[in-house]
Image (cartoon, helix red, strand yellow):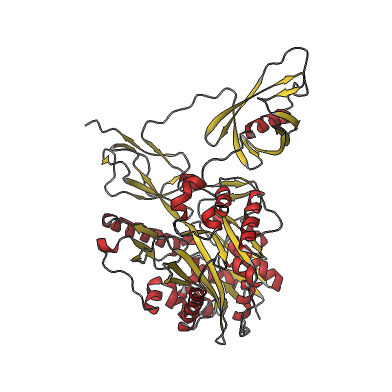
Amino acid sequence: MITSVLVANRGEIACRIFRTCRELGIRTVAVHSDADDTALHTRVADQAVRLPGAAPADTYLRGDLVVKAALAAGADAVHPGYGFLSESADFARAVLDAGLTWIGPPPEAIEAMASKTRAKQLMGLAPLTEVTEADLPVLVKAAAGGGGRGMRVVRDLDDLDAALEAARAEATSAFGDGEVFIEPYVEDGRHVEVQILADTHGTVWALGTRDCSLQRRHQKVIEEAPAPGLPAHLEAELRTLAVRAAHAVSYVGAGTVEFLVADGRAHFLEMNTRLQVEHPVTEAVFGLDLVAEQFRVAEGTALPPEPPAAHGHAVEARLYAEDPATGWTPQTGTLHRLTVPDDVRLDTGYTDGDEIGVHYDPMIAKVVAHAPTRAEALRKLAGALDRTTIHGPTTNRALLIHSLRHDEFTTARMTTAFYDRHLPHLTAPAADPHAPLAAALADARAHGDPRFGGWRNLPSRPHTRRYELAGEEHEVTYRHTRTGLDADGVTVVHADADRVVLETDGIRRTYEVTRYGDTRYVNTTELRALPRFPDPTTTQAAGSLLAPMPGTVVRLAEGLSQGTTVQAGQPLLWLEAMKMEHKITAPATGMLTSLNVTVGDQVEPGTLLAVVEDDPR
């Protein structure tokens, strides 16, 4: 019987597993890097053990340190979570060799399936060894790990070598394994997977299907169960193939078999020998706690011959600290507030006041809705996200809402190219035009404006306040009159420091206003208060390349130096932030007149990286 477990992971993953442990009466042990010293998962665990350092390769990917931590804390089992070492056969063996219970599949099963190249061979498939024009487009893919890291689509043979190099570097950083392979890239298909659960007695459950087609950078954004609109024979084929894969490697525990469905056919992608991020939608539909089932299987309990019946439909949205409108740029900073309605499930590794840093994945939380039908589940989740309060770094919340309500998604016609087709429309600014006025009135109240109370005999001068909204400056003007406040035809019904009610054309709307320094949140709209008399600003030279995010310079283009002639769009350097590489390219053809960084440098947003000027020669 398991009494104490160390979770070899962090953030939302560890918090989610700890929740089940508490329900089962199991003591919990967290591990944490220096960057996670005060992270939520360290605060909710019964014990926490430090892994010195910040980079994943020095901390969460050090299996030897994790095993030592488990023994030092007196744990009798290790749960790998999902990500990091969860698909490492060597780590599983190290746990078992230390006399600890491993809550996962046998090392041999991990070894057979954790490498995507070996998994394909086991399923009778083989990666491409030589790529020709006829094979394009192709996908360069990391053999280990997942989550879209170490993946590059190649549409031109001239780009293949660079894609291989970038994928190897990213895979090494994220998984400690730089092996990559090449396979045909199936465009415009649907990403469908099957959740399996197997015990030590030979029983394998296929717990329905999930659709994970809405992805950015090959990483899932919205997932649902069951996968909608699949023909009965194809759904049965997917379940059969998943069970066959599990039996082929004598699988034990929870796992996922992934497919790409196109033209009515299923193309095997990989088997993830771990729990998936999107497992909550399967839990909701089948009424299961898959983590609890993992513990029971690890203790030798037999599964019933058949899984429970499925009920309803579930949808999950991943809430990321990123800006979809600027190339999915990850965001950092303080998460001041996160609240969601009570009728949906929230899995998160953050609470109010926590810092979102640069070292790990930018996912803040997962929000999950379950309802009797797909249409109701989509409406419920979109409505919940609409009412969610997020104060802090820019997030993809608006994108999620627009995606859930998009006709192509609501009618189940989406594919993995959904965001390639619709991203500009889904990220178009839609801020409330009256948000600056509400902020101005609330600020006036908060600052104790003595003239705010009403009209005086002497005509009052108009009041002005300036705010930045969606990158644009807005000046608000209002004045006191005999009948109240004159604010460009908007009737001010009520105004105090944190609540303003405005009426336009007979329709009233309430605005809740919150302040953090110069930042204002007016309902869900973020603004920045600008000074009345702006200070002179220094301007950057034309052609300046500024860091779009905090991160580490991990590579410079070969031969790049001051005085080099570069072409518009040419990659100059790569930043790593939140476990992903981000390419910085030349804004125009010209000469590199300044190169201000070297490999290994840490940069903040706005740091001058380089300058490209017109070549005077």
214 relative to 296 in the view: left or right: left
Name the outermost residue toward the top: 458
When the figure is inspected, residue 449 is found, relative to residue 376, above or below; the finding is above
Name the residue located 52 percent from the left edge and 78 percent from the top edge: 105
Relative to 129, say whether 549 is above or below.
above
Quadrant of the rendered structure where residue 71 is? Answer: bottom right
Q: At which x and y percent is residue 342? A: 71, 57
Q: Quadrant for the N terminus, please.
A: bottom right
Task: Report whether residue 449 is seen.
Answer: yes
In the picture, the quarter occupied by the C terminus is top left
Residue shown at the point (63%, 56%) measured from the top left: 379
- Measured as percent of width and height from the top left, residue 187 is found at 39, 61
Q: Nearer the viewer, residue 93 or 135?
A: 135
Q: Is residue 87 above or below residue 413?
A: below
Residue 441 is situated, as x and y percent measured from the top left of the image, at 70, 29
From this view, report whether residue 590 is shown above or below residue 481.
below
On the picture, is 21 further left or further right than 553? Answer: right
* Most foreground residue, 313 or 363: 313
Q: Quadrant of residue 30?
A: bottom right
Q: Is residue 48 visible?
A: no
State left or right for residue 11 relative to residue 505: left
How many numbered marks appear? 0
Give the percent coordinates (x, y) of residue 401.
58, 51
